[in-house]
Image (tube, rainbow, N blue to C red):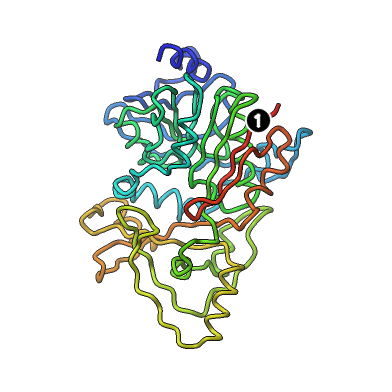
């Protein structure tokens, strides 16, 4: 433990007072300016109420620039697209407690990766959610970050070292960590440039020889009926994207799609009503659409008894960002996903000159890669 604490000093910031900044630490959530920290905007902790007060979304110019080492510069990270603000950030803030209650089982492959790390390793979980992987290996020191201040509050209450940060602009020193993980995060980023930049950031923050594990949802779902129940994005949402690398316009399926309830165990065990379609040719058309479709809304059903009467759910309903489903007794939120096709995750990493793929595999309907930093 002493060794881990000493290694942690590599990323901890100097006193905020010394930097001319006001203290913003409450519990174990640190919203500090690290030494050599990249410019970003986070939420700030209100120490009087121990709650997190959101600030505006981070925004960086959309000009494309490529460094000599093959990585895209910060100028290529666009302002956060509206589709991510509305259908990722706001949704997870609203559903955080219920979402957290369903996220407790550890994936064996992720657990095996973390358990294999050397004694005293410093590990970053970027997009840590409710923190279920933080502290999994008691011989390592863990820190986490997530864009959702509500999920970070849950992590903080559990005693984890966490902060609010954007996956495309991590506020950590270059080369500070021994390993990093990004579990089910990149598929919430709506452009190829943002997804690639998030990978570059994970590689940047680990030292030479450090390992990075990334997992994303696959379009090749083991349960093929599951994906037919997601809602493909149609043309009206294309305006929500900005800059190069935007998804192509997709033609929505002609088949009526229903929402999918999330189970308490895993989405693979979800119970749903199967849409009966007697027309065989339409079935074939639907299968072809699925193969070409990668942008989806995946619903989250927040039970009425878990939804706040005058809180985030009420605001979302008023703004048209959620709907009521009285039959299921839930407020339904749509979450944006870009599901990855076979080989897509590997292709995103090929332009990163200071990393190489040491393993790649398909697990539980997810594409996964392990990268090693080489420079």
Q: Tell me the crowding category of disc 1: few under 14, some 14 to 19, or many 20 or more residues within 10 angstroms, Cα based.
A: many
Viewer-proximal residue among 129 and 317: 129
Residue with the most extreme left position: 305
Relative to 19, is 185 above or below?
below
Place of residue 18 in the rendered image (x, y in percent of width and height, measured from the top left): 48, 12
Place of residue 86 in the rendered image (x, y in percent of width and height, measured from the top left): 45, 54
Relative to 3, is 121 above or below?
below
Q: Is residue 318 visible?
A: no
Residue with the most extreme right position: 68
- The quarter holding residue 239 reads bottom right
Viewer-proximal residue among 100 and 63: 100
Relative to 238, is 72 above or below?
above
* Number of marks in the rendered image: 1
State the residue at coordinates (37%, 65%). Answer: 260
Q: Secondary structure at mark 1?
A: strand
State the residue at coordinates (47%, 32%). Answer: 114
Q: Quadrant of the image for the C terminus?
A: top right
What residue is shown with label 1?
Answer: 373
Viewer-proximal residue among 309 and 122: 122
Judge left or right: residue 267 versus residue 184: left
Place of residue 51 in the rendered image (x, y in percent of width and height, measured from the top left): 31, 34
Q: Is residue 305 visible?
A: yes
Place of residue 53 in the rendered image (x, y in percent of width and height, measured from the top left): 37, 37
Q: Quadrant of the image for the N terminus?
A: top left
Judge left or right: residue 292 versus residue 84: right
Residue with the most extreme bottom position: 279
């Amino acid at each position: 433990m002493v060794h881990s604490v000493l290694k942690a000093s590599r990323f901890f910031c100097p006193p905020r007072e010394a930097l001319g900044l006001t203290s913003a630490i409450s519990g174990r959530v640190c919203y500090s300016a690290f030494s050599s920290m990249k410019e970003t905007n986070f939420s700030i902790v209100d120490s009087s109420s121990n709650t997190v007060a959101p600030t505006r979304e981070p925004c960086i110019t959309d000009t494309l620039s490529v460094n000599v080492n093959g990585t895209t510069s910060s100028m290529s990270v666009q302002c956060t697209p509206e589709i991510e603000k509305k259908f990722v950030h706001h949704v997870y803030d609203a559903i955080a407690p219920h979402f957290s209650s369903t996220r407790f089982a550890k994936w064996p492959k992720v657990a095996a990766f973390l358990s294999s790390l050397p004694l005293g390793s410093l590990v970053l979980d970027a997009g840590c959610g409710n923190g279920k992987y933080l502290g999994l290996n008691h011989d390592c020191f863990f820190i986490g970050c997530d864009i959702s201040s509500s999920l970070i509050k849950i992590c903080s209450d559990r005693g984890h070292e966490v902060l609010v940060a954007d996956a495309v602009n991590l506020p950590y020193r270059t080369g500070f960590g021994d390993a990093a993980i990004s579990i089910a995060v990149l598929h919430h980023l709506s452009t190829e440039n943002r997804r690639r930049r998030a990978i570059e950031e994970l590689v940047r923050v680990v030292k030479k020889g450090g390992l990075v594990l990334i997992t994303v949802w696959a379009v090749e779902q083991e349960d093929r009926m599951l994906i037919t129940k997601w809602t493909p994005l149609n043309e009206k949402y294309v305006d929500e994207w900005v800059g190069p690398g935007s998804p192509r316009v997709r033609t929505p399926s002609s088949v009526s799609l229903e929402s999918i309830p999330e189970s308490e165990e895993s989405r693979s065990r979800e119970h749903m009503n199967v849409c009966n379609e007697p027309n065989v040719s339409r079935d074939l058309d639907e299968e072809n659409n699925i193969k070409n479709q990668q942008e989806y809304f995946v619903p989250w059903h927040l039970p009425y008894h878990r939804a706040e009467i005058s809180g985030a759910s009420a605001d979302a309903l008023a703004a048209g960002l959620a709907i009521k489903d009285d039959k299921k007794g839930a407020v339904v939120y749509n979450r944006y996903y870009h599901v990855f096709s076979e080989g897509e995750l590997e292709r995103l990493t090929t332009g990163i000159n200071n990393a190489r793929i040491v393993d790649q595999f398909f697990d539980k309907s997810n594409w996964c890669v392990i990268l090693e930093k080489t420079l």
